[in-house]
Image (tube, rainbow, N blue to C red):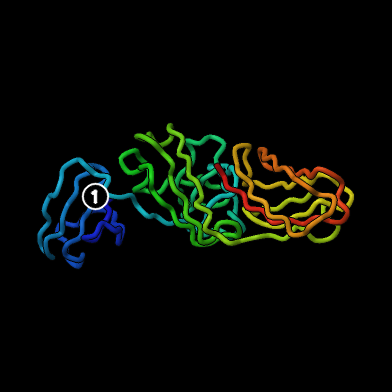
Amino acid sequence: MAITYCPNGNMIGLSTDRPATPGTIPGGSFFEETDTQDIWFAQNSTTWVLAAAGVGGIGRRLLDARVATTANVTIASPGATIDGKAMNAGDVFLAAFQTAGAENGLYTWNGAAVPATRVAGYDNGTEVHGGDLVSINTGDAFQGDVFVLALDGAATVGTTSLPFQSLRLSTSTTDGSGGAGGNVTISTISGRAAVASGATAVTVTSPFCLATSIVMLTPLLIDANVAKYQVVPGAGSFVVTVNAATAAKWPFMFTILRA
């Protein structure tokens, strides 16, 4: 794999290999070859110049995937849909929440009951770097989001845990505050829920919540009985507790920051 950079250091494209000659690649662009980490300079349409050998790290790649998973999937049989979207043969997906972190990464979908395969060009340690970015094209939860690989040091793909973290660019929300309020399941990173009238707590179940998450909460109603509240995140859910039984349904907005 090689990465194209324009003269000011911004990434302008991604190529599977550095061609023999720059050809139509803009003069003044830089390429980083991730297998050697050599930096090459496109002097003109016919000439490459080795700018620096083995240094790498000018920047990281911006990759893309059709969808990202929302929880652990079985790589050997990933199912027909991912994040609410029917998959097609050849679609690329980001496995970001595998129970075994070493399984995380970019995969090609080959069938609902057919093993997914790691994407060629992102399947060994010379091609996977901390700081790599993956943009997500569609999905009920992650459409428009970007994930960053929060990795310090070298990776052995299949052995090293690859912690991809969403930068939370999606504005998708779900309103679960209807009716009388109370415990609810909301499968998006942000939404609305409510403590029921006369209650002191509500549990919001979410596949995006971890025990280490930060849950930002904004009350949508002033309740004379509620002087303070507490949010306690856990694995797969968070609990909102108020200091006294509410006088009426107490709705709030939330956003989960997955730490």
Q: Is residue 119 above or below residue 45?
A: above
Screen quadrant of the C terminus: top right
Q: Residue at the location (29% across, 58% down)?
A: 10
The number of numbered discs placed on residues in the rendered structure image is: 1
Q: Amino acid at mark 1?
A: Glu
Furthest residue toward top: 159
The local secondary structure at tag 1 comes to strand
- Horizontally, residue 175 falls left or right of residue 188, namely right
Give x and y (percent) for residue 194: 78, 54
Q: Considering depth in this image, is 82 or 213 the residue closer to the camera?
A: 213
- Horizontally, residue 227 falls left or right of residue 43, namely right
Furthest residue toward bottom: 24
Give x and y (percent) for residue 171: 58, 62
Q: Residue at the location (35% across, 34% down)?
A: 153
- Horizontally, residue 6 falls left or right of residue 161, namely left
Q: Residue at the location (69% across, 56% down)?
A: 253
Q: Considering depth in this image, is 164 or 167 the residue closer to the camera?
A: 167
Give x and y (percent) for residue 1: 28, 50
- Horizontally, residue 178 falls left or right of residue 45, namely right
Q: Looking at the image, can residue 90 be seen?
A: no
Q: Residue at the location (81% across, 43% down)?
A: 243
Q: Residue tagged by mark 1?
A: 32
Give x and y (percent) for residue 19: 19, 57
Query: Residue 85's image quarter?
Result: bottom right
Q: Looking at the image, can residue 101 be seen?
A: yes
Query: Residue 80's image quarter?
Result: bottom right
Q: Considering depth in this image, is 38 or 18 the residue closer to the camera?
A: 38
